[in-house]
């Protein structure tokens, strides 16, 4: 693994985010707008728990929600680069697949953290007052990092299946929609709970909810969520890398 | 001049000055044979034209030599390294200018070149100087500060070519580098490609501009339906086929195959 190559590629991925308005909107403005909309709509609605608004109940799910769209941008980016012959061109340099995928993991983790920082600031401004400590907030960021990693893996899997950037957008919703509806802030039923057990965002939302409700970061529930999200990340990224190496740039 | 190999062991002979040795190379896609038993040698420091009609197998051959496709059978060496075993070594030696201008459109021309220099782990100072000298050589210094999104087709081609040379490669594979360029830009690029020979580089050039191959190449191979049908210097081929230029040779031998239904 050569760091000069990885950082050169990370820089390019981040420049793409900044210089392409559609990417910038989807990755940065969209989660911010969504937080504003939900904040303004639900900040004054009682949740059933005295002194806690519906928005405060939803906030941990919103943090996870922001990261889910990384799936789409990664899938689009890979498919687009493949269509334009860029993956093939990079393949003629000494850059390895691991370095290339590693650069996507790093850049998208950075993007995921930027998203969450914006959503956190906005949600605090809209009255979200979580219990817990600063260490709890740091722990929450660790969960977000793993969710971003999962999203990159799912994006890779999507790009492998999709034949074009347009198809990648559509196919990415197979992974995005269930996570949005069954693994973030939308209340789940006993039926959707079963589906939720297979979704990375569910464990992140569950852990963030516990942390923000003041549960100790080393509580069994939070640690179990952490263990599961780590295992899921490794499995998804490993599948993504294997598929990408075999079929990804063809 | 390039000759066909007689001895299969020659392919790994370290005492030759061959930059590339291709031996009985075959590539099949299902039932279709894109490259059929292709053999040739390219000497160090020569410009070698790989010519043929559309779909003849030129790009497939280049893709096998640069590690983008695995051969079905046969073998080749690039810079003395086996394409089946030493791809990472080969990738350090080569520069590849693909047929499709593969460029990040949201980056400037200069940023594109520098990115690929970094992928070859070039030293920062060396990268800056090399980028500057390449841009100057094709009069692109000013335009290189603009995003590639606004470039014309010809400008994209020029950056496409410069990217392939940023790492100062020993062996450059240029797959139709001047397609879409206006006559003036093409002329500048021809001179630039010619200057690579003076720098001691080996160049594999595929082109549909036969006059380009005639002017630049020390030797040419003409392939059709994946098979080698002519090999030699432009002068030798013109004499052999009693033609006044290479285009006439090309038309005679590829046209004859069509008429004879080969």
Image: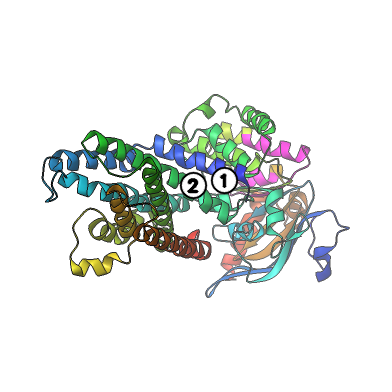
Q: Does label 2 lie on the same chain as label 1? A: yes
Q: Write the residue at 38% across / 38% down.
A: A20
Q: Quadrant of the N terminus of chain B?
A: bottom right
Callout 1: SS: helix
Classify mark 1: residues with Cα within 10 Å, few (<14), some (14-19) or many (20+). many
Question: Can residue A58 be seen at all in this image of the molecule?
Answer: yes
Secondary element at tag 2: helix
Using the image, tell me which numbered label, if any, was put on residue A106: 2
Where in the figure is residue B114, as x and y percent of width and height?
Answer: 59, 36
**Does residue A132 sit above or below A98 in this rendering?**
above
Q: Nearer the N terminus, badge 1 or badge 2?
A: 1
Furthest toward the top, the residue is B142
A77 with respect to B139 (left or right) = left
Q: Residue at x 16, y 47 (%)?
A: A54
- Which residue is nearer to you in this view: B86 or B56? B86
Quadrant of the rendered image containing residue B10: bottom right
In this view of the protein, can residue B7 be seen by the observer? no
- Range of residues picked out in magenta: B189-214
Task: Locate residue A194: give its quadrant.
Answer: bottom left
Asked if the stretch drawn in magenta spans residue B212, the answer is: yes
The spot of residue B161 in percent (x, y) is 60, 41
Circle 1 residue = A6
């Amino acid at each position: 693994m050569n760091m000069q190559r990885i950082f050169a590629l990370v820089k390019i991925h981040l420049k793409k985010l900044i210089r392409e308005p559609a990417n910038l909107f989807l990755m940065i403005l969209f989660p911010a707008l969504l937080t504003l909309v939900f904040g303004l709509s639900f900040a004054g609605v009682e949740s059933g728990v005295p002194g806690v608004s519906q928005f405060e109940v939803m906030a941990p799910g919103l943090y996870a929600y922001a990261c889910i769209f990384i799936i789409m941008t990664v899938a689009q980016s890979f498919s687009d680069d493949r269509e334009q012959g860029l993956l093939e061109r990079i393949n003629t340099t000494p850059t390895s697949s691991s370095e290339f995928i590693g650069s996507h993991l790093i850049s998208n983790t950075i993007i995921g953290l930027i998203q969450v920082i914006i959503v956190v600031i906005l949600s605090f401004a809209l009255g979200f007052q979580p219990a817990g400590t600063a260490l709890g907030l740091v722990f929450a960021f660790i969960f977000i990092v793993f969710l971003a990693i999962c999203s990159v893996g799912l994006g890779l899997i999507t790009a492998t299946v999709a034949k074009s950037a347009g198809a990648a957008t559509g196919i990415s919703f197979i992974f995005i929609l269930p996570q949005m509806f069954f693994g973030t802030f939308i209340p789940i039923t006993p039926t959707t709970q079963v589906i939720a057990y297979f979704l990375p965002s569910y464990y992140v939302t569950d852990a963030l909810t516990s942390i923000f409700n003041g549960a100790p970061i080393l509580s069994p529930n939070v640690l179990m969520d952490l263990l599961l999200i780590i295992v899921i990340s490794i499995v998804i990224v490993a599948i993504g890398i294997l598929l990408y190496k075999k079929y990804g740039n063809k | 001049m390039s000759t066909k190999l007689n001895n299969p062991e020659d392919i790994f002979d370290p005492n030759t000055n061959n930059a590339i040795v291709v031996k009985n190379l075959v590539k099949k896609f299902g039932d279709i044979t894109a490259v059929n038993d292709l053999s040739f040698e390219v000497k160090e420091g020569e410009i070698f034209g790989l010519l043929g009609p559309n779909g003849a197998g030129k790009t497939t051959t280049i893709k096998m030599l640069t590690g983008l496709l695995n051969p079905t059978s046969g073998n080749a060496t690039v810079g003395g390294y086996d394409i089946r075993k030493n791809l990472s070594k080969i990738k350090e030696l080569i520069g590849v200018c693909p047929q499709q201008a593969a460029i990040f459109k949201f980056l400037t021309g200069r940023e594109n070149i520098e990115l690929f220099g970094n992928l070859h782990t070039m030293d920062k100072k060396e990268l800056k100087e090399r980028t500057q000298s390449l841009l100057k050589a094709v009069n692109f210094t000013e335009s290189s500060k603009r995003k590639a999104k606004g470039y014309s087709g010809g400008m994209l081609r020029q950056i496409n070519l410069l990217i392939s040379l940023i790492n100062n490669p020993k062996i450059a594979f240029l797959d139709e580098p001047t397609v879409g360029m206006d006559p003036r830009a093409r002329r500048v690029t021809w001179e630039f490609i010619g200057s690579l020979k003076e720098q001691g580089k080996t160049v594999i050039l595929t082109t549909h501009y036969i006059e380009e191959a005639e002017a630049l190449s020390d030797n040419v191979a003409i392939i059709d339906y994946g098979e080698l049908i002519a090999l030699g210097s432009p002068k030798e081929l013109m004499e052999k086929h009693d033609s006044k230029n290479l285009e006439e040779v090309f038309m005679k031998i590829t046209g004859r195959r069509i008429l004879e239904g080969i």
